[in-house]
Amino acid sequence: MAGLFITLEGGDGSGKSTQSARLTGWLTGVGRTVVVTREPGGTSLGLELRDIVLHRRGEIAPRAEALLYAADRAHHIATVVRPALERGEIVVQDRYIDSSVAYQGAGRVLDGTEVRDISLWATEGLLPDLTVLLDLPESDGRERMATRTKYDRLEAEAGEFHARVRAGYLALAEAEPDRFLVLDARDSIDTIADAIRERVSTLL
């Protein structure tokens, strides 16, 4: 049985964790083995890098930030994702290359093609079978995050940054419509979960 690589993308507060849990529960229920992971932080090394890129005090140069994410990604794919896919398992992952292109490319105003190329080199060209983009306007994301008392470095960025990130995501989805499933994150949890299951069913 072939493995399947599914990633969930979207801005802060878009519901990726909720939909990851719903999808994982359904896949497990139909008898598939699922590996649930995330970037950054899907390995012990990744947790250290996650702490640096998201919680380190002080500025990190945009190119350094992009390279730290790529370093985490290279190790994560080699040690977690590829082995699972080779075992025929399904990987459900919170964030991947598209996050770097949207956040470090569009958000930090780096060259998105260069950011993507670094990650493709780091992962030996691995792309997801399906990328679910939970699209949410920046203002709605801010409203959903309003109850938080602590924000990481990216969550704390200004609204203009998050608007650029959203636009970056939508441009990626438009460029690769066969890989992306774009859903309105303002819809109900059940509506979104049903749409994801319907698309994933065609890949099983």
Image (cartoon, rainbow, N blue to C red):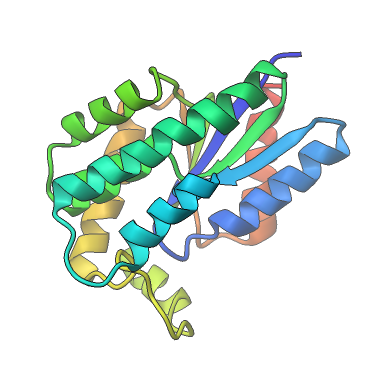
Q: Position of residue 39 (x, y in %)?
A: 47, 46
What residue is rendered at 54% in x and 54% in y?
A: 16
Q: Quadrant of the C terminus?
A: top right
* Residue 91 appears left or right of 14: right
Q: Position of residue 41 (x, y in %)?
A: 49, 50
* Residue 71 appears left or right of 113: right
**Which quadrant of the view contains residue 81?**
top right
Query: How many marks on residues?
Result: 0
What residue is rendered at 13% in x and 54% in y?
A: 61
Q: Nearer the viewer, residue 185 or 52?
A: 52
Q: Is residue 167 visible?
A: no
Q: Nearer the viewer, residue 165 or 69?
A: 69
Reply above or below: 85 against 166. above
Q: Is residue 145 visible?
A: yes
Q: Position of residue 157 (x, y in %)?
A: 24, 69
What residue is rendered at 68% in x and 34% in y?
A: 198
* Residue 79 appears left or right of 175: right
What residue is rendered at 44% in x and 86% in y?
A: 149
Reply above or below: 135 against 149. above
Q: Quadrant of the N terminus?
A: top right
Q: Position of residue 183 (x, y in %)?
A: 50, 47
